[in-house]
Every structure is written in C-alpha cells, then in structure tokens.
Image (spheres, helix red, strand yellow):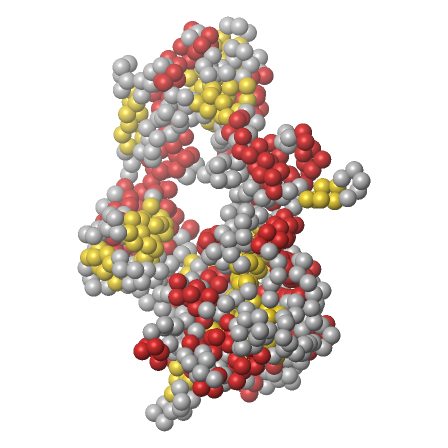
Amino acid sequence: MKIQFDSNLDYQDRAISSIVDIFEGQEVCQSNFSVVTHGAKGQRTINDLNDLGIGNRLELLDDEILSNVQNIQLKNGLAQSKKLGSMDFSVEMETGTGKTYVYLKSIFELNRRYGFTKFIIVVPSIAIKEGTKKTLDITTEHFKSIFDNVNYDYFIYDSSNLEQVRDFATSSDIRIMVINIDAFRKSFTDPSKDTKANIIHRQNDRLNGQKPIEFIASTNPIVIIDEPQSVDSTTKAKEAIETLNPLCRLRYSATHVEKFNLMYKLDSIDAYEQQLVKQIEVANVQLEDSSNKPYIKLMSVSANPRSAKIEIDVNQNGTTKRKTVTVKDGDDLYEKSNSRGVYSDYVINDIYIEKGNEYIEFSNQESVNIGQIIGSVDDDSIKRLQIKKTIEEHLDKELRLTQKGIKVLSLFFIDRVANYRQYDADANPLKGKYAQWFEEEYKEISKRRKYSTLFNDVDVNTEVSKIHDGYFSADKKGILKDTSGNTVDDESIFDKIMKNKEKLLSFSEPLRFIFSHSALKEGWDNPNVFQICTLNETSSVMKKRQEIGRGLRICVNQDGERVRGFDVNTLTVMANESYEKFAEALQKEIEEEEGIKFGVIEEHFFSNIPVVNEDGSVEYFGASKSEDMFRYLQAKEYIDKKGKVQNSLRADIKENKFEVPQEYKAVQAQIVSVILKVAGTMNIKNADDKKLITLNKEVYLSDDFKALWEQIKYKTTYRVDFDVDKLVLECAKQMANDLTIGKIKYLYSKAKNKITKVGVEILEGSAEDKFMDCDIIDYELPDVVTYLQNETNLMRKNIVDILIKSGKLQDFQNNPQKFIDGAVKIIKKTMNSFIVDGIKYQKLGNDFYYAQECFEENELYGYLSSNMIENKENKSIFTHTVYDSTIEENFAKAFNENENVKLFTKLPSWFKINTPLGGYNPDWAVLIEKDNEEKLYFVVESKGSGLGLDIKTSESSKIECAKKHFNEISQDVQFVQSDKFSSFREYL
C-alpha cells in the first residue's frame, strides 16, 4: 500500500504561500536552459560568478522583500518584522502536521514561480535525514503529477560520491541535497590541518582541485534548515551554514529557539483546535493506598542554600499523605515524616548538585537520583501491568478501527535491549523479560469474550511471536545492542524503520507491537501508532513532546488515505505519572519550547481581524491599530505590563460591560472573540466587587448587643473522665464491624487532554479509574502498637487488647499502613464519643472572656455578588453578613426578615470554644424579643443532623462539647443546632 498525499490542505497551502510570496515581484524564468554567456533571470552562469556551475539568482531589493514579509505576517496575524535583519525566514508547525511535505512542496512552487533550482536541506541527525529521504522517495510520483512532470533529482550527501556534488552544481534542473550538519561542520583555513576538516572542505582531484563546498557555494542555494534549534545552535554550525553561501535560509520547526522573521505559525494549540493531530489520552498505573515502604522521590536540588526537594509519605492527623518537603544535610526523614517508622534509618548524609549527576545519599548508604523513586512497589510489576494495559488499549481500538480499514500499531520504548532480547553462550537469541511478559499477557487477554471477533480462526499460540518485534541497532555479528541514536550502526536501523513504514500499515503484515530503543525516538514516524508505552529503567526523562510526537500524525486506512476526527484519532500514552501531572508538564514544555504564553495577549493579536469597508472591500485591522488596542487594555488595567489577562477583563466580558474604543466598535465582536480564546471562561471573583464590612455602631454599642455578648463571652476550662475498659471494648467492637482492609490494588487511570490558549487541561468527563488486584507483599510489617499509641495516647496494653479483641490482625498484613490509618480513625472516633459523655466544663471566672472590642480590631471582607448580603437597618452589628454556604445565606436572609429577631451576628473566626478535639467556632449569636418584652438569647449552629452529620465525627463531638460549655457559663443562653430556619423557629 502507498500513503496518499492531499495537495489541497488549506493550512499547508498557507504555510507554503507564506514562504513563496516572500519573493513576490521576482521575474519568472524557465529552468530548462543551457549555460549561456549572459545570465538569464533567476539564474547565475559561470560568466556571472565563476566556472563552477549554474545557481539561483535574486533580483529583489531588501526593501521589496521586507514589504512582502510584513504583508504576509499581517495576513497571518504575526508580529511584523521592523527591518530585514537577515535572509532567515521561520515557519512554525506542530509535530505531525506535515512540515517535511510543506517545505518539499515549497521547493517546487519556488521553482515554478521564480525558476530557483538549487536547494539544500540541512538536518541535525541520522534519524531526520532518513525520514526526509523516505518522504522524498514516497512523494516523487505525487509531486510530478501536480507539477507537470517536472525534472528533478535528490540525493543524500555522501563524501565518497562527489560526482553528485558536481551534478548539483552544473545541472539546470531542480536539485535537492540532504546533508547532516556534522558532514560539514569542521572547516579549517590552515592547510596543515586540512586532514582534520570534513571532506567537503578539502581540495579534491576529482573536482579539478576544487573543494566540494566551493561547487555548492557557487550555486547560491536556498538552504532549508530542518529543526534549526538542533542544527545551528552553535557558532561553528552557523559558520558552516554560511560556507554554503545561501540565497536565504528557510527554518522549519515546532520548537524554534530563535524565530527569525516568523512567517507562519501552526502551534500545538492551532493543531489541536483544528484536529490536525491526534488527541492525547494519558493513562498510568500506580498502587492505591500503599505507603508500607519508605517512599522517596528526589524532585530537585539547590546550590544556595544546599538543599533538596523530595516527595515522601507524611503522617498527617492520623492519616498518611504524600507531600513534597525541603531537606538539607543532616535532616532525619523520621522527623520530616512526623515519626513514620519506615524512615528510621534515612538521615540525609549529603546532597550532590553536579549538573547531570544530582542525587542524595543517606546515612544507611542508600541513594536516590533526581527523578528516581525508591521504596515504591516492585518496578517489574508496574512495567508488566503497563504492557498488559497497552495490549488492552490496543485491542479496544482494533475493535473500533479494523472495520474502518485502519491498522492499529503500538510502540514500546525501552532503554536496555537485554530486557527484550538476550543471547546464550552460542549467540542464539532468547526472549528477554519484556518479550516473555508480552506474550503471556497477550495470550491471556486474547481469551476474553470481548475480543473474540478479533481472533476468529487465529491460533494465538502460533501467531503471538509474529505480532511483536524489536527494532534495535546491531553489531557486525548481528547481535542487538544498546545505542546512542547517532552512530553508524543506527543508520541501518533507521533505514529499516523507514523502509517498513508502509508495510507496517497493511493488514497483510502481522506485526503490530513494536519494541524500540528510546534513543531512536526521533526515527519513529508512523501515522498509525495509537499507543506509546515507555518502559525505561534509568532515571533519564524523555520529554513529553518527544514522547507524544511519535504518534501525533493523523492515521491512514488501507488505501493510504488520512482518516480525520478525534473519534478515530486518539493517542494513548502510558505515562509514569498521573494525567494531571502529565498535563502540567506538557504545558510547561509547550511554554518553554514554543514560546506560547498561556493567558497572555500580545501586541499583534488583533492585527489580522478582517474589516469590511463601505465599498465592500476587505482589509486587515493592522499592526498599529492592534498595538493601540493592546495599550487601551493596559490603560484600563485589563491586562498587566506583560499582557497577562486580569480577572477584571474576564468579569466585564462575562457581564457584557466590556467596551472597545468608539473607533473600533465595528469589530468589537471579533476583538472579544480573540480575547476569549486567551482568557478562557473560568469562574472568577471580581476584585472590584470586594468590600470591607463595617460595624453598625448604633447596634454595636446598644444595650441589647451588650446584653447578648454578656451571655456568651466567657471562657471555660474542662476535664474528661471515662472508663478505659469500656473504651477498649467499644473500639474493638467498632473495628470488628467497620474496619475491612483488602489487599493492595493497582489503580489504572486515564483522561484526555485538550490544548487551548488557556493551557493544557483535562477534558471534562474523560477521566476514568479502574482497580486491579496486586499480589505483591515485599515490605516489612511496621510496629503497629507503637504507632497507634503515639496517635491516640492510649497505653500499650490498651492498644494490644483492642487489636486482639477486634479479630482484624489478618487485615493488617493485607495493607499495614491502610490498616493503621483506619484503626486510628476508629479509635479516635470512639474516643470522641467517650469524651463528649465524660467532659465537664468550668467557668474560668469573670476576668476571662472575649472582649467586645475585638470586633473593631479585626477587618472583615466579602464579595457583594457571591458571598455577602446587606443587612436591614439595626438588625446586626455589621452592615453586611458574609456567609460560607447556602444554608448560612438562607439563615442570614431569614434573620433579617423575621420580626422576632431583634438582632443577630455571624460569630467571627476568633470566637472559639476550647474542646479536647480542637477549637470550635459556632455560627450565630441571636437575640429574640417576643411581644416587645421577653428576651431570649441563642447561639445557633447551622449544621445539624439534617446534613447527615454523625454525632461521633470530630465536628459533631465539638458541637456537643459546646453545648456543655454554654450550659456552664449562662442559664439564659440556649444552644441550638439546626440546618433550617424553619426548624429554629420552633424555639421562638
């Protein structure tokens, strides 16, 4: 089968014209001519320059080119070049959108329009060189069909075949040379060092004593730089490209470091929004609720002060939480984890900050490299499960896509060939562990009824060895080996990968699962890769964009035609982290590599908005007006100095208050549309809506409020008495009934990403979790008695009695840390109820109380439209009431409206009642007046049984303690717990 190419894709045509139109005004000439005495337009002859050949010739002035460049940039909504600093022109295209096709087609358009014939494609690596050659191979018929069967030839520069260089210089037809930057980077002017230079820079008898570079330079070639951030990132490389004497340099990449005269931009946001690449779905496998080993992950190191950030499991309020902490030399992780015994031997011995070799060493001689994890579950188990889930994802897609004529491929990247292929003493190949696991899992999964339609008349035991294979470099004996990705041996494997590109897409080829070395990642470029799983053992991290880049291209069917749409094109990446962290890291890479500033408006953003004139003609809004609009947004403080969108702009657009200057009213809708793409539609609180709540002094100083405050202001102390034997029996009973700890399980999570100008986000509704059994028990059992004693302050004897009488010690072995966390919660919960029953409060005396003046010393803020209401006159000591929930909002409204409520106030956060379970802050203080005579004082808690609160929970226990506190300090105040005003009304 052959991949079909569509020559009418609008986004590709715009990228091509954005380069070709730079030379608008250059006269058209024929390319089929012989060398003549006087130079024809568009070409130089030997008489024009020297006797080395025929080349390109540019007749336009710099001012004419600059005018063309600015017009193209305006049309494409890009910042306009102020001057023509160089003949470098950049095109930014997201990986997978056809960058190579675009610059190849541009070659033929430049020839048709202006007669240019000499082109050099400079690439950074063997992989990209082979990929470019493959595209040239498979597009020959395509380009000849759309460019009138034009004569052209292409070749990979080979220093042993310099006749190709002579032909390149002397032919009048289109000539395309593909050359690796390393082939001409070394150049020396000192003749004594000539042998150290690349052959291209040495004099050669076969070229009449000339240097090959001189033949090339005489043609004044158009140089196309593929991935310039890797090609000419050094001074030497830039000098080498100058020796080619280029007419201009056309720079193509998805991740430019320097953007010279940016002509066209199709970034990752555009590609996603136009569905020009696959949607990304991130999946991961992790252990759920497993903190039984000393988990440590080194996140980063710092030189000044010498420190490191690590991720560990921390004891927090009786449960285990994974947190990032900062450590320095001498720090004890036992202390940092709040006394978790598994870290008892982990004291920071030294922090190494050497770039590329960062690690921490502990007092027990263990060490952890940056990005590495120790104390996690057996790594092989996770990797085997990743292989299993990749197979399942693959077969799920086959069920949907096979009927559409689409073959599904999966790609595994590994960093050690021995994990896939090993050899015995006689060099006979043997299956490595990954190959064995794959075959075992595939056989098992294929038995499922769900996949029965895929295996009709298929002997899986026979076929399984044919559906997977490894693509690795080999030595002279054919033994597969690890590789760097840029050696002579790698060249042969890249050639194999490219040659098999179309073959792999055919149903007739059984191979569907490919294992390859992670160093060869750039070489993989197959549109039907739907799953990518990286099984690296080292701590080196493959960038997210490199990882997903191997499978971003839109897939093809058996006719070689692209099949578009996210319903078909979803790339599943088996990641080693959660999908949230993957999305966060991907966004950071996009920001760094593409220069995209999420949520930021730039000066030129509005320039290509089309404006319809009175006569019906259309022109662009323009750069100067766009800059004017940018300054207007800054003046209104809608954006900051760097263009970052402020909440005030989002709020005004949301409430239809946003206005553009009068002269731009005709395009307000288009301007708002541009802003919304950047600003997003997030829910925000308007900073202008924020209001300082003031005291109503008339109510605050009134006798009524003073009387209410007198009833509730006093402080108390408490003591607790309870029967320990009864507590032990009740704890054991609760554990027996409520504590069930199953074995540790794997959690398989996945979710789809969406990429917009707001950022990389999780697609709403796409997240899903699945649990799977894990049979691994390879951890030491912790000292459960000591741990529970530290958390509950009970005696060891009581803890032992509870554990034995509960009959749950078997569950402890299933998942020790989860058992401990659950036991702590049950014991504390049971203790709460005993505390409530046995607590006794005592008033400290008349000199210990909350002073009324505290209301004046603490400022209170709220938002008018979201969490506060205005109080009726003389109803409260504050002009407004700030609420935290709908229940509180309803109470505040009811207090304002009810005639019997003389006054009320939301009790401030500093008003706290001490309890053994922590401070408690009631919601309301209320004064009720009935028939203008009888006065009743209430403290109201607007959370209650109607909310489903269990009396044994910590908060409910605090409420019960509060009731006893108020009973102690006043006979006239009544504490009421109610979640509805209608229920509270019964007390009126």
At 66% from the left and 58% from the top, the residue drawn is 24
The percent position of residue 48, horizontal first and vertical second, equals 57, 70
Residue 832 versus residue 801 in the image, above or below: above
Q: Quadrant of residue 113?
A: bottom right
Q: Nearer the viewer, residue 639 or 460?
A: 639
Q: Nearer the viewer, residue 490 or 742?
A: 490
At 27% from the left and 41% from the top, the residue drawn is 724
Residue 410 versus residue 772 in the image, above or below: below
Q: Nearer the viewer, residue 782 or 154?
A: 154
Residue 21 versus residue 466 in the image, above or below: above
Image quarter of the N terminus: bottom right
| Residue furthest out toward the right | 615
The percent position of residue 626, horizontal first and vertical second, equals 61, 40
Q: Classify residue 470 as left or right of residue 43.
A: left
Whether residue 128 appears in this view of the structure is no
The percent position of residue 868, horizontal first and vertical second, equals 53, 24
Q: Quadrant of residue 141?
A: bottom right
The percent position of residue 381, horizontal first and vertical second, equals 41, 70
Q: How many marks?
A: 0
At 50% from the left and 72% from the top, the residue drawn is 217
Q: Nearer the viewer, residue 118 or 615?
A: 118
Residue 938 versus residue 840 in the image, above or below: above
Whether residue 839 appears in this view of the structure is yes
At 53% from the left and 33% from the top, the residue drawn is 634
